[in-house]
Amino acid sequence: MAKPLDHAEIKTGQLITMFMCLVAGLQQDMRWLVVLGAIFLVTGLYRPMSPFVWAYRWLVQPLGLMKSDYRIDNIQPHSFGQLIGALTAAIILGVYYLGYGQVAWALVLVLFGLTLVSYLGWCIGCFLYYQLHRLGLRGFFGHEPTDKTVFPGQRPRRPE
């Protein structure tokens, strides 16, 4: 069901994701991806326990670091995107532990890039969600985009 969602909360998670990818790459330490994958999984399965949500509500918002950005939207595509992120982190870790370190670090760079694109307004996880809906999957995938004037996966416009 579509309702007002604070996209500043979502952007906080995107910023933290990019930061963790950057630190992982600079330190050449895959433990950051283990933690990030776990955060993605928690956020995708039970958003109220998400460290992304906590960081926004207990730190970013009270300190006034980012203004609220409410838009009419469905949470399900964003949850699906988090689960795609968890799967991506698992794939990166699998590739790394199979001995393909350079490929794994390239995939970390891809994750960083896709998160940046999402931060700028188009989410590949949301896009995939809406394509699965379009193919006729219902249940979890039963929600259409709330703003039909934008490309699927693109952030809905602010209400007027």
Image (spheres, rainbow, N blue to C red):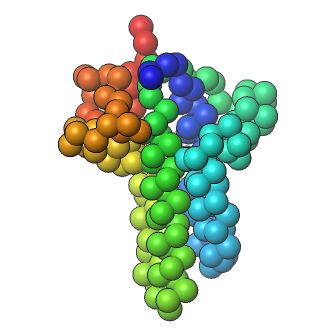
Q: Is residue 15 visible?
A: no
* Count of marks placed on residues: 0
The residue at 73%/32% (across/down) is: 57
Expressed as whole percent of the image width and height from the top left, the position of residue 99 reads 50, 91
**What residue is rendered at 53% in x and 30% in y?**
7
Side of 31 where 89 appears, left or right:
left
At a point 20% along the width and 43% down the height, the residue shown is 135
48 left or right, relative to 142: right
Outermost residue to the top? 160
Name which quarter of the figure residue 30 lies in: bottom right
Q: In the image, residue 89 lies at what x, y percent?
A: 52, 66
Q: Is residue 127 above or below residue 102?
A: above
Image x and y of residue 70, in percent: 53, 20
Check the image and name the residue furthest to the bottom: 99
Q: Residue furthest left?
A: 135
Q: Is residue 160 above or below residue 19?
A: above
Of 87 and 123, which appears nearest the observer?
Answer: 87
Q: Residue reaching furthest front? A: 139
Residue 68: image quadrant is top right
Q: Residue at the spot x=78%, y=27% of the render?
A: 62
Q: Quadrant of the C terminus?
A: top left
Q: Is the N terminus in the top left, top right, bottom left or bottom right quadrant?
A: top left
Vertical position of residue 26 compared to residue 22: above or below: below
Residue 37 image point, x, y percent: 59, 62
| Residue 61 position (above or below residue 55) | above
> Which quadrant would residue 120 be assigned to in this image?
top left
Would residue 88 be found to the left or right of residue 122 on screen? right
Is residue 147 in view from this perspective? yes
